[in-house]
Image (cartoon, rainbow, N blue to C red):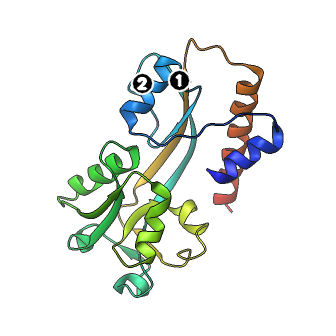
Amino acid sequence: MPGLLKANKQNSPNLNIQQYSAKRRRIIRMLLDGDADFAICCPLLTEEPDLESLLLYTEQGVIVYPSDHWLKDRKSVSFEELKDENFISVSVGYGTRDMQDIYFKTAGIVANNSVETTDTSSIFNFVKDGLGIAVAPKSMTLRNADLCDNFVEIDEAPIATIGLTWRKDHYLSEAGKAFFETTKAFFTGLSADQSK
C-alpha cells in the first residue's frame, strides 16, 4: 500500500487519502453507504451486485518463516507438512484469511492460528520474532527487508486476486478518476515486474 499511496500522491499532490483496514463485510458497507469511494481487496469483491470490481493483480502466496526455521533449506512445502505449525494470520472476516482457511480446508487441515491480528503490517514482525509462520503475498514478502529471503513456495500454489471496487452509481470526482487511473497503472507495473 505505501507504494500505491506514494504513486497517487505524486500524480495528485492535493489528493486526500484516508486508508482503512476492515473486515470484508465492513468494507462492503462503507462502499454502499458512500463512506468510501474505493476499496482494494483480496480476494476480489464479487458478492454485492451494487458494486463493481476490476481485477488489478493476481499473484502466488508463499510461506514466510523466521530465520531459524526448518523451512530454511526448502524450496517448496505442502500444506500437509505445515499442519503442526503455529500460524500468524489476520482475523476471520478478512479476505486473505478467508482464502487461507479455504486452502487449509481443501487440504483437510485446521491451521493453528497462534496469533491473529487486524494489523496486516505486523504479521512480518511476528514471524521475524519467531511467533510462527504466515501465508503472505510473494510480492509483499520480497519487499520486506528482514524476511525477503525467508520464504518457500507452496506446492498447492494458492493464488490471490487483488481488485479495486467501487459503487456502481457513485459519482467519481476528478480526484477519484485520477486515483482510479493511477491505481490501475501501479498494478499493471507490478504485473510487468512479476513477469520478468
Q: Earlier in the sequence, mark 1 or mark 2?
A: 2
Disc 1 marks which residue? 35
What amino acid is labelled 1 in the image? Asp
5 sits to left or right of 124: right
Q: Identify which residue is drawn at 39% across, 36% down.
A: 24
Label 2: how many Cα within 10 Å (few below 14, some 14–19, many 20+): few
- The relative height of residue 73 versus residue 161 in the rendered view (above or below) is below
- Specify the amino acid type for callout 2: Arg
| Dot in front, 1 or 2 | 1
Q: Residue shown at 48%/43% (left/top)?
A: 21
Q: Can you identify the residue that label 2 sits on?
A: 29
Q: Which percent across, then down, holds residue 66? A: 42, 80
Q: Is residue 185 visible?
A: yes
* Residue 150 as seen in the image, left or right of residue 18: left
Q: How many marks?
A: 2
Q: Quadrant of residue 69?
A: bottom left
Residue 189 image point, x, y percent: 72, 50
Q: Residues within 10 Å of mark 1 (few under 14, many from 20)?
A: few
Q: Quadrant of residue 136?
A: bottom left
Alpha carbons under labels 1 and 2: distance apart: 8 Å
Q: Position of residue 99 (x, y in %)?
A: 34, 48
- Which of 174/52 is in front? 174
Element at label 2: helix
Q: Position of residue 14 (x, y in %)?
A: 80, 34
User: Which mark is drawn over residue 97?
Assistant: none
Please give the name of the residue rendered at 44% of the width and 42% of the height, measured from the top-left corner: 43
Disc 1 vs disc 2: Cβ atoms closer than 8 Å? Answer: yes
